[in-house]
Amino acid sequence: MKKFNCIVVFNEDKTKLLFCKRKKDPYKGLYNFVGGKVEKGEDGTAAAYRELYEETGIPSKEIPLFHFMDFTYYHHDFILELYVGKLSSSRQLVEEVNPLEWLLLEEDFSDPERFAGDQNIAHIVNVALRVMEDRV
């Protein structure tokens, strides 16, 4: 079964979340978390740090990541691993392909016209917030 990851990134004061605006399908034109493919034999956490750095320029020393949830999509034969972290300080982002944007936590993350994931993003954000509260 293939593996992919998504990384939920909070800014340093936990008022905003980092999203990319997808340039290709699936979910072209919609906001999604940064992330990508876990290579065969690659550790999931290492893959999350690699993808985060490739897509944003954020190095591992600036954000501890916690693996907090997985989704298994049997009909598409893949597992989506979810990680969450909070930046230690403000930083300039470096876009790889998809434009990056900080969105306020007050957004309606369940809006399918703006957000990818078939309304899963709202659920993921809610769980990620709880995980981060436990880690403060």
Image: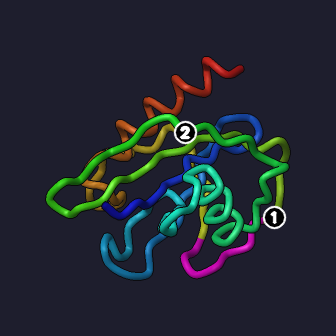
Q: Main secondary structure of the magenta part?
A: loop
- Residue visible at 30% across and 51% down? 111
Q: Is residue 110 visible?
A: yes
Residue 95 on the magenta segment: yes
Residue 62 on the magenta segment: no
Q: Nearer the viewer, residue 92 or 25?
A: 25
Magenta span of residues = 93-99
- Residue visible at 54% across and 58% down? 19
- Residue visible at 55% across and 44% down? 83
Q: Is residue 93 left or right of residue 73?
A: right
**Quadrant of residue 66 within the rendered picture:** top right
Q: How many marks?
A: 2
* Farthest residue, direction left: 75
Q: Is residue 90 left or right of residue 75?
A: right
Q: Is residue 30 left or right of residue 103?
A: left
Residue 11 horizontal/vertical position (percent):
70, 44
SS category of the residue bearing label 1:
loop
Quickly name the residue at label 2: 67
* Farthest residue, direction front: 41
Quickly name the residue at label 1: 92
Crowding at dot 2, Cα within 10 Å, few <14 / some 14-19 / many 20+, comes out as: some
Lower position in the chain sequence, tag 2 or tag 1 = 2
Q: Hey, what amino acid is under mark 1?
A: Gln
Label 2, label 1: how far apart the Cα atoms are: 24 Å
